[in-house]
Amino acid sequence: MSALVLLSVVGVVLLYLGLFGRRTALAATGVAGLLGTIALIATGWHLESPLFAGIVRFDGPARAYTLLMAGATVLLFLFGVDYYARMQRNVAEQYALMLFSLVGGILIVSFSNLVMLFLGIEILSIPLYILAGGKRDSFRSGEAAFKYFVQGSFASGFLLMGLALVYGATGSFDLAAIGTWSADAAHGHDTVFLLGLLLTLAGLAFKLAAVPFHFWSPDVYEGSPTLITAFMSTVVKTAAFAAFHRFIAALHLPDAVGTMLLTMTVLTLFLGNVVALRQTQFKRLMAYSSIAHTGFLLLALVGGDPRSGDVLFYYLAAYTLATVGLFIILTLAKRAAQGEEHIRIFRGLFRERPWVAVAALLMLLSLAGIPFTAGFVAKYRVFMLGLAGGHVLITFFAVAMALLGIYYYALVVREAFAPREQEGGTLAVAPLNWLVITLCGVGVVALAVWPVALP
């Protein structure tokens, strides 16, 4: 409760600081609020606190995901000091809206009632519709915001209808009560409950960018400001997957739902990796890469293994570190290339900024799942879960897709270590950006040595 209040208050304070023109205090205030949130969560780690009459429960997984999301937001706020310094307009609302969105993310990783799931998703999403259109002079940014809003509204409609049908079938919004009801064999073929589950999962799948609910992702990633794209691909993805897992883990899923999830997993793995092969714009490549990673994460969940929560958290932590760092490096290379986003803007990176190139290499290797990185450990654990769940063919298909994915990451590595054919702009790296890139680069290796698990 105190963490939610703190973040909300800090968001309002940021708006007032912007109103009085205190730009230099924005990032520092936001980071202070986030560090305070991390401290509150860490000091109350062993306390399971029901809030709002029990519809929110801060159990171990909820606290762990909150720490991961708050930590990622700290890295993005540190990046934001340099990112927003070049903008003449007021940016207080950018910081504040990210904090408000984070509040929604915290609510959906800790919900124990379907009403809070819906409210949390809306609190998470509405600020993002505004943030996606943050580049006011860019047509693509406006297009991204419009597409995200329209398709997000349809997803919310699916979710709300699904939750209404689940309530109609079970007579309760409480997750534990619904889980008990679904475990009764007599309810296994209830048509209303089945339809409600399918619609609810479809609404959640939109936030995961799982096929066939992925259409918004490439355009929104490409059109949104880079910092916001990084926020959506890390913090929002983490919150959505944590909520998705919390929902399906509490229920006894009918066979039809399990078949739907397996089909979604295969389609997501295939489309994400295959379409990524044809991408030359880095943001679109990362969008389809994100879709591909959604497929791997779904594979970890479909078997219903008790270890799936640990694997999911570890995978998301590894993915978050690599993605945040790469989007920062993209921003620096984009400035030097006068706004271009083609992967060739990374050419000559090693010669000009060796450590930045090495850090990028480590992050790309982690995303590709190459040994001695956190991404390799994460994918290995996913494949072991797939085999343990009896999904042998799908697991081998996922391995093949992982091998295919190495190619498009290798294209970026090749550009970073190739000599530059002609002189371009100087790639300037601010001290805070150095810090975040170093943390991300070292983190994807350290996490491979020191795996983390949910409490």
Image (cartoon, rainbow, N blue to C red):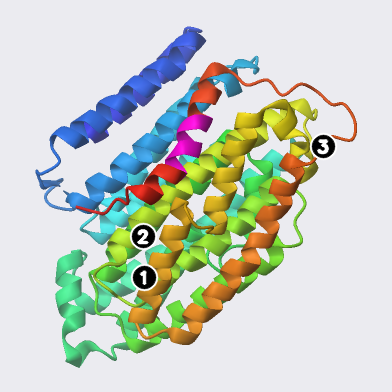
Q: Residue 117: x percent and y percent?
A: 31, 56
Please report whichever mark, 3 or 1, sits nearer to the chain's N-terminal start: 1
Left or right of residue 373: residue 360: right
Q: Residue 182: x percent and y percent?
A: 21, 80
Which residue bears the numbered disc 1? 301
Please report whichever mark, 3 or 2, sits nearer to the chain's N-terminal start: 2
Tag 2: residue type? Leu
Task: Name the residue nearer the viewer: 120 or 345.
Answer: 345
Give above or below for 315 relative to 362.
below
Tag 1: residue type? Leu
Find numbered disc 3 in the image and state the secondary structure of the residue it sits on: loop
Which residue bears the numbered disc 3? 419
Residue 443 painted magenta: yes
Task: Name the residue nearer the viewer: 429 or 161.
Answer: 429
Give neighbour class at mark 2: few <14, some 14-19, many 20+ (Cα, 10 Å). many
Which residue bears the numbered disc 2? 312
**CA distance for labels 2 and 1:** 8 Å
- Whether pointer 2 and pointer 1 mark residues with C-beta atoms closer than 8 Å, the reply is yes
Give, as a single range, the part of the protein colored magenta. Answer: 437-444
Q: Residue 53: x percent and y percent?
A: 11, 49
